[in-house]
Amino acid sequence: MPDAAKNENSAVPFAPLHAYALAQSCPMCKASAGAPCDAPQKNASLRRKDAIREKYGLEPVDHDPTHRMHARRVDAGFRHRKQDIGRAPWPEDRDPERSYSTIGQLQGTRRPRRNKSPLPPGADLATRASAVLDGSPGQVEWPYGLVTAARSAYKTQADFEEAIRDRRMAQYVLVAWAEEHGLRQSSTGCCPRWLQRRASRRCAVGNCTRYGPSARDSRWLDHTTAWLFDGRPAVLTSAPYSVQAEDDEHLRRWTTEDSRLRTTRGTGWYGFGTTQIVLWRADLLDTVVPACVGSPASPVDA
């Protein structure tokens, strides 16, 4: 691995994207972590661009190193870098002499999963889903956005089949993520005030920060799912289409006022360009990693 990836400049809080990507193995050409991609077409394209510049007497340029890598490897590096940014302190609280990149480091620790009735190996998705969501194996109550697509919503059979594949992958990611953290969905969870309680109980009318005319967290708590750990409120996940400065301020307020709360963000399972925000109780779970379609938890890496 290049020195830039191993020994980052201490004045830079995060390593560049190409260093994160190079630290991943490539699922396309099977290059190991630290080795360049075997991408002859990409390299040939860059050589053609260099030849054109030379032909017209232009100065040579340094190409972005990610242009020599396969897209799926770059995507993996992007997700890793985004996780590091989400886990790091707020920009104004960062140590200017410290790098927050975790390239080559272990990604945090979690308390072991405590499932009193572990599922047998090879259990199908419906059975696994019913263990972490409401409903039964025959009728799983998927969160909004993960319900199996209807044929009537798509013009062509090809579009419908693609939607089914995408929805199926998202369902797998959600279930694997919940299993990994030992979580079960709560039907009463609503907002961070629910998360602060000893038992799962919905907020009284007018006291919830998600519902109501003066609910300050309603914007970032879009497509929200609440999760229990050992029967106690533990995690909130949401998927807003954008995250505004005021949302960051509200999240920071929660983590500042309650030292048990932590937050991070990633891509999640909802899709459509949304950002998954995770707010969790660190006294119950040491670390909660955002879910990600295309991560090792998913059965298919598109």
Image: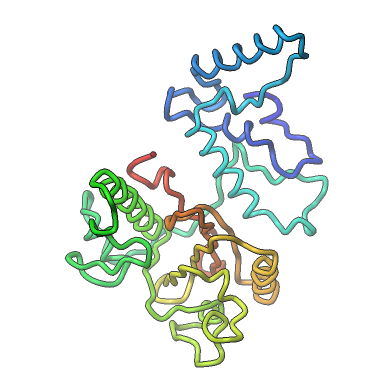
Q: Quadrant of the N terminus?
A: top right
Q: Image point 73% across, 9% down: which residue?
A: 56
Q: Nearer the viewer, residue 262 or 21?
A: 21
Give percent across and percent down for residue 237: 49, 66
Side of 158 relative to 65 (left or right): left
For the image shown, how many numbered marks are present on the structure? 0
Residue at the left extreme of this rendering: 138
Where 245 falls versus 37 (above or below)?
below
Give percent across and percent down for residue 141: 28, 69
Q: Image point 39% across, 47% down: which residue?
A: 297
Residue at the top extreme of this rendering: 55
Q: Image point 80% across, 58% down: which residue?
A: 92
Q: Quadrant of the C terminus?
A: top left
Its colouring scheme is: rainbow
Side of 151 relative to 215 (left or right): left
Where 159 falls versus 182 (above or below)?
above
Give percent across and percent down for residue 277: 55, 62
Where 97 falls versus 241 (above or below)?
above
Q: Image point 68% across, 54% down: which residue?
A: 88
Q: Quadrant of residue 23?
A: top right
Side of 212 relative to 85 (left or right): left
Where 138 falls versus 18 (above or below)?
below
Give percent across and percent down for residue 226: 44, 72
